[in-house]
Amino acid sequence: MFIFDISNPLTLVLMVAATVLLIFLAQEVKKSAVAGILLMAYLGVLIFHVAELTTLSEEFRYLSETLSRCVAIDFVFILISFFSYLWVDDIEARANNKKSLDNSLDWFWKKI
């Protein structure tokens, strides 16, 4: 059975590097859509891992621990990409002089 094991250290390092580069790209071009695409990709990976975990047959039960770790890591990446989306959306709104999607984290952005 094929699983996309993101708990593997090499895969995890590559995903962190890709996430940081895409967030940096979104910040440089001031487009929150780039961070939104990243968020949607991680949501898709989470759905994929949960579907694999729920449809796991008895002969592959030994993979349930690995898939559970992958789901936990997916949630961390979703949290990071969600906050980066809000951050880049705030940057984009200030650059275009328009209202941000959500201003509830203004206190947080001012401290950064």
Image (cartoon, rainbow, N blue to C red):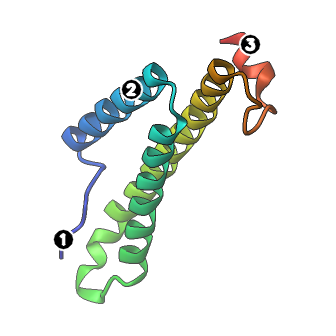
Residue carrying label 1: 2
First reached walking from the N terminus: tag 2 or tag 1: 1
> Which residue: 68% across, 20% down?
94
- Tell us which disc is closer to us: 1 or 3: 3
Q: Which mark is residue 74?
A: none
In-image side of 1 versus 92 (left or right)? left
Asked if the residues shown at circle 1 and circle 3 are in contact, with their CB atoms under 8 angstroms apart, the answer is no
Which residue sits furthest bottom?
Answer: 58
Give percent across and percent down for residue 96: 65, 23
Q: CA distance from mark 2 to mark 1?
A: 31 Å
Residue carrying label 2: 25
- Tell us which disc is closer to us: 2 or 1: 2
The amino acid at mark 1 is Phe
> Which residue: 51% across, 47% down?
78
The amino acid at mark 2 is Leu
Find residue 44 and report its image quarter.
bottom left
In-image side of 45 versus 59 (left or right)? right
Give percent across and percent down for residue 102: 76, 37
First reached walking from the N terminus: tag 3 or tag 2: 2
Asked if the residues shown at circle 2 and circle 1 are in contact, with their CB atoms under 8 angstroms apart, the answer is no
Q: CA distance from mark 3 to mark 2?
A: 21 Å
Give percent across and percent down for residue 18: 30, 34
Q: Is residue 69 above or below residue 26?
A: below
First reached walking from the N terminus: tag 1 or tag 3: 1
In-image side of 30 versus 101 (left or right)? left
Figure label count: 3
> Which residue: 44% across, 39% down?
34
Task: Find numbered disc 1 in the image and state the secondary structure of the residue it sits on.
Answer: loop
Residue carrying label 3: 110
Q: Residues within 10 Å of mark 1 (few under 14, many from 20)?
A: few
